[in-house]
Amino acid sequence: MRLLVLVLAALTVAAQYPLWWGKGGWMRVHELQKQVAAQQENTQALAARNNALQAEVQDLKSGTSAIEERARGELGMIREGEYFVQILPAGPKP
């Protein structure tokens, strides 16, 4: 009788092993769920970035104020009749 209980316990453990640690076991499922959640966060961040870029493109297509802002900021351009004044920070005295 004792041998039968040991054999049944060993068979139960052998049957449970693939369920928990096998190729499609619970541990693998949990790991894949974490990967899916991380990928969804990444996708949401990229979607927000795409929306911001799309809004910027739309702004550049529709008006001149965005183009002017870019020209001033990135290219250092000024309008006709304006003066560019650059103030340098005070450095250490020699």
Image: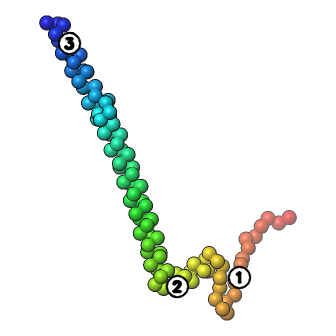
Residues at marks 3 and 1 touching, judged by CB atoms closer than 8 Å? no
Give the image location of residue 46, x and y in percent.
Answer: 43, 61
Q: Residue at x 61, y 80 (%)?
A: 72
Q: Nearer the viewer, residue 46 or 87?
A: 46
Give the number of the disc on residue 26. Answer: none
Query: Number of labelled discs?
Result: 3
Q: On screen, 91 above or below 4?
A: below
Three-letter amino acid code of the residue under disc 3:
Val
Q: On screen, 19 above or below 93?
A: above
Q: Nearer the viewer, residue 89 or 80?
A: 80
Q: Secondary structure at mark 2?
A: helix
- Alpha carbon of mark 3 to alpha carbon of mark 1: how far? 90 Å
Mark 1 surroundings within 10 Å by alpha-carbon count, few (fewer than 14), some (14 through 19), many (20 or more) = few
Three-letter amino acid code of the residue under disc 1:
Val
Q: Residue at x 36, y 54 (%)?
A: 40
Give the number of the disc on residue 85. Answer: 1
Query: Which residue corresponds to mark 3?
Result: 7
**For residue 31, what is the image quadrant?**
top left
Residues at marks 1 and 2 touching, judged by CB atoms closer than 8 Å? no
Q: Is residue 61 left or right of residue 15?
A: right
Q: Nearer the viewer, mark 2 or mark 3?
A: 3
Which quadrant is the C terminus positioned in? Answer: bottom right
Give the image location of residue 64, x and y in percent.
Answer: 52, 86
Q: Is residue 56 left or right of residue 38?
A: right
Give the image location of residue 58, x and y in percent.
Answer: 44, 78
Residue furthest to the bottom in view is 81
Query: Which residue corresponds to mark 2?
Result: 65
